[in-house]
Image: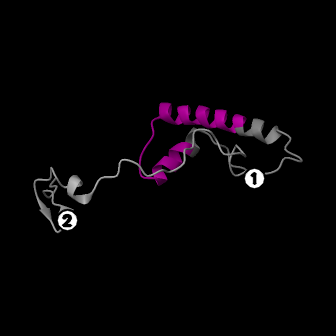
Amino acid sequence: MEEKKDREYFKKLAHQLMFDLSDEEADSLVREFGTLEGQMALLDAVNTDGVEEMIYPFEAETAFVRKDEVSNVITQDEAMANVDKKIEGHFVLPKVVK
C-alpha cells in the first residue's frame, strides 16, 4: 500500500533528516510532489512498445563534438617563465589558510 504524501508525511521526513518544516513549507512540498507525480503518470502512459532502448538521445556523432587536436604547445621553460617561485620544475604557491 502506498503511503499518502501529505503535510505530516513531509514534516515527519524532515524531522528524520534533522530539520523542521513550517506548515507552509510542508504544504508547498505536497503541491510540488503532486505535480511531479502527475508528470510521472504522464510519462508512464506513453506507449513505448517496440522502442529500442538508447543510452544517448542521438545515434550519430554530433556536429558540436570536435576532434582532439594538439595545438599551441609551449615548452616547460615557457610555462615557467613568469613564475615567482619554482622547485624542480614545479610551481610553488603559498599555503592557503582559512
Which quadrant would residue 20 be assigned to in this image?
A: top left
Local crowd at mark 1 within 10 Å, few (<14), some, or many (≥20)? few
Residue type for callout 1:
Met
Query: How would you rate the neighbour count of disc 2 (Cα within 10 Å): few for under 14, some for 14-19, many for 20 or more?
Result: few
Gap in angstroms between the C-alphas marked 1 and 2 = 65 Å
Q: Earlier in the sequence, mark 1 or mark 2?
A: 1
Residue 34 vs residue 78: left or right? right
Q: Which residue is mark 2?
A: 89
Q: Which mark is residue 15?
A: none
Q: Which residues are magenta?
A: 10-39
Question: Label 1's element?
Answer: loop
**Residue at figure coordinates x 74%, y 50% from the top left:** 54
The residue positioned 52% from the left and 48% from the top of the image is 12
Q: Is residue 44 magenta?
A: no
Please provide percent x and percent y for residue 61. Answer: 66, 45
**Of circles 1 and 2, which is in front?**
2
Instruction: From the top left corner, tell me how far across and down residue 68 is, in percent.
Output: 50, 51
